[in-house]
Image (spheres, helix red, strand yellow):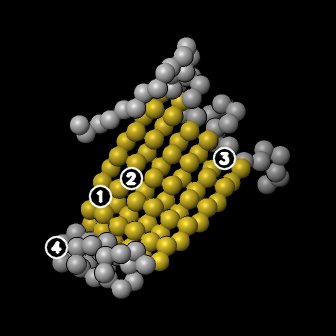
Amino acid sequence: MADETEQGEATEGDEVEVETDVTVDVFDVDGDDQPDTVVITETTLVDVDGDGQADIVQQVTTTAVDVDGDGVPDIVDRVTTTGIDVDGDGTIDIIDEVIETGIDIDGDGTIDEAEVTEATYVRDDDAEG
C-alpha cells in the first residue's frame, strides 16, 4: 500500500486540513547523459483553525549529488523551512529553517561528515525600518 494514514481517536472539532505536494527533478549537470543530481521538494500546508488559510507552511527540499559518477550520492543536503502564522492574520510570524548536510568524502557510499544548522526568525511589528 503506497499511501498510509495513521488515525487516532478524534473528538469534536479536531479536524485539521493538510495539503501536500511533492515534486522530483533530475538533472544532468556535467552533460554526460547520466543523472547526477536529484532534487525532491515536498510542500505541506496546514490549516489549523479551519478558516481556509494555511497557518503552517512547511517545505522540505532534499538534494542528492553524485560527484564522482558512481551512481551513489556523495553530497546530501536537506533544507526544512517552516513558516507559522501564530495570530491567524494571514501573515507568517515565525520562520524556522534547518539545514542538514552530509558528505561522503572518500567515495565509499557512507556519509563521513555531517553538519546541521538551524535559524529562527520572528516578525517584529514594532521594529523601525
* Residue 114 location (% of width, % of height): 49, 73
Q: Is residue 12 left or right of residue 31?
A: right
Marks 4 and 2, the one that precedes in the sequence: 4
| 76 in relation to 126, above or below | below
Which residue is painted at 38% across and 78% down in the image? 104
Residue type of the residue flagged with mark 2: Thr
Q: Which residue is mark 2?
A: 41
Residue nearest the observer in this picture, 5 or 53:
5
Secondary structure of the residue carrying tag 2 is: strand
Marks 3 and 2, the one that precedes in the sequence: 2
Q: Quadrant of the N terminus?
A: top left
Q: Which residue is mark 1?
A: 25
Q: Residue furthest bottom?
A: 106
| Residue 87: numbered disc | none
| Residue 33: numbered disc | 4
* Residue 98 location (% of width, % of height): 56, 59
Marks 1 and 4, the one that precedes in the sequence: 1
Q: Which residue is mark 3?
A: 94
Mark toward the viewer: 3 or 4: 3
Marks 3 and 4, the one that precedes in the sequence: 4
